[in-house]
Amino acid sequence: MWMDGILTDRGKRSKAKRSRAKPRRRQQTVKVSARTRERNAERRKRTALVLLCLAVLVGFGWVGHRSFKLLSAYLFTENDRYVVQVWDFSTDGPVLTPAHIRQYAGLRERENLLALDLREIRYNLESTPAIQSVQVSRRLPDTLVIRVQERMALARLDQVGSVPLAVDADGYVLGPSSLRPNLPVIRGIREPGIRPGMRLSEPYFKDALTVLTLCNRSPIHPHVRLREIDVRHDENLTLRLETGEEVRMARAHLEPRLAELVEILQEQRRRGRMAAVVNMTGHAHIPPVVTHQ
């Protein structure tokens, strides 16, 4: 019995301790929640302050940028002092005029020198088939300087039923304005739809351009003056000279073959003879065959 009393007392004390511990835990939970709310509120205040500072900085930046643009326009790009008065254009070729250059560059009256985009002007001009390279610069306060290097026509393209076109040493097709009556003709072109601005790069065509370029140089030029080149054969080129000879030449080792052709022609002329056909289609070690008229 006395044991039951002891156990009962202990149980009562345990219940009393638990009942006293519950309010303390509730108080601690309330305190933690209050601190969490305070920290969250403080964090929100800091975030709002940072966002406000950023908005102010962006606003000042926009106002400053806008003010700078307005001031720059007032002082420079919309200032009549810098309106172009002198168009200093020149070209090294016979085709383009200052009016052509101005048109192809896309320039208008009363352009502001400082507002012009020089890269765009250069791009517009270099997109023109007849132009090889361009230099564009400003000369303050009112002069635009453009120096143009034209593509020089090397030959005419023989295209049946099409507008006659020219081609330069790099294979770029030029317009009809580049044609000259004394240009040699390239016959047997295979590409369809040839137009100005295209670049012809087929191997047989590049070989024809190589022959034309070499024949325009000394010491070959005085002796081999071409009237036309026929490129229809896959392995050989057929050259027809202004002096009447026909030369059939393999496409390999063109420069030494042309040098050998000069020697053959000189020897024939020293003998007072006129070659009708010079066959140089064999290998380099095979002597050419000369057929006389």
Image (cartoon, rainbow, N blue to C red):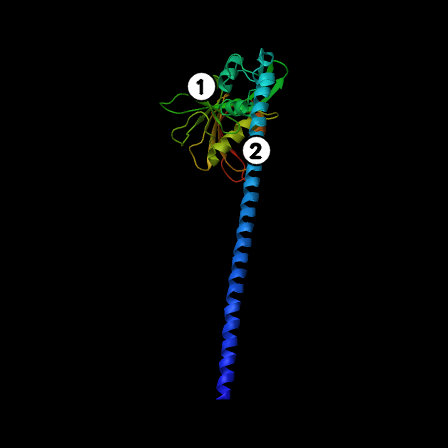
Could you say which is closer to the camera, residue 290 or residue 284?
Answer: 284
- Which residue is located at x 51 percent, y 62 percent? 26
Would you name the residue on which mark 1 appears? 176
Q: Which sits in the foreground, 161 or 273? A: 161
Badge 2: residue crowd in 10 Å (few <14, some 14–19, many ≥20): few
Q: Identify the residue at image location x=53%, y=68%.
A: 21
Q: Residue furthest left?
A: 161
Q: Which residue is mark 2?
A: 56
| Quarter of the rendering containing residue 132 | top right
Tell me the CA gap for discs 2 and 1. 62 Å
- Mark 2 or mark 1, which has the lower sequence index? 2
Q: Position of residue 168 (x, y in %)?
A: 51, 25
What is the secondary structure assignment of the residue under circle 2?
helix
Residue 262 x/y as whole percent: 57, 28
Three-letter residue code for mark 2: Val
Position of residue 191 in the picture relative to residue 92 (left or right): left
Q: Is residue 147 visible?
A: no
Q: Which residue type does callout 1 highlight?
A: Pro
When the figure is inspected, residue 259 is found, relative to residue 283, above or below; the finding is above
Point out residue 281 in the picture as x, y percentages from the top left corner. Answer: 49, 36
